[in-house]
Amino acid sequence: MSSYERPDFGALDDLERLLRHVGDELATWRRRSLHAEQELSELKAKGGMLAGPELIQVRQRVADLEGENQALRTRLDAATERVRALIQRLAFLERDLEDGAA
């Protein structure tokens, strides 16, 4: 029996872990978006009017969410770039394996 391990297995594991993380981030973002939409619908059902302190809280919440959205976009862009790099690495390893098998 050989102790040979395909070099692309490690890259595949990295890609799977990264994709799972991106999926979790996306699911969290979606839940938060749905919750915000629900809050907006409830506000519209009340006639869309807020009292002074509530208005300040809503504005702060919007600012916080916009900041978090930007941070999530940055993280998603970084994750996308890591996925691209892993895909390129996998393609290289597959070509290397094919060249070695030929």
Image (cartoon, rainbow, N blue to C red):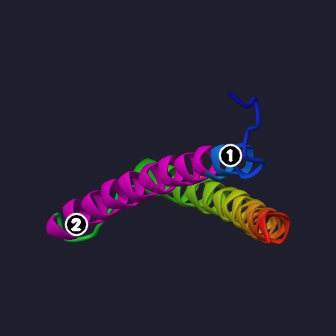
Give the side of residue 31 with respect to residue 101, left or right.
Answer: left
- Residue 33, position as x, y percentages in the image: 40, 60
Residue 57 vertical position relative to residue 55 in the rendered view, above or below: above
Quadrant of the image containing the C terminus:
bottom right
Which residues fall within the magenta stretch?
16-45
Real-space Cα distance between discs 1 and 2?
Answer: 47 Å
Where does residue 52 sit, x and y in percent of width and height? 44, 55
- Amino acid beneath label 2: Ser
Residue sitting at x 68%, y 27%: 1
Residue 21 position, x and y percent, is 58, 46
Observer-nearest of 3 and 12? 3
Q: Which mark is residue 48?
A: none
Q: Nearer the viewer, residue 44 or 36?
A: 36
Side of 13 relative to 102 (left or right):
left
* Residue at the outermost left position: 45
Q: Residue at x 22, y 70 (%)?
A: 44
Name the residue tied to disc 2.
41
Q: Residue at x 73, y 52 (%)?
A: 8
The dominant secondary structure in magenta is helix
In reply to whether residue 99 is colored magenta, the answer given is: no
Amino acid type, label 1: Phe
Q: Which residue is mark 1?
A: 9
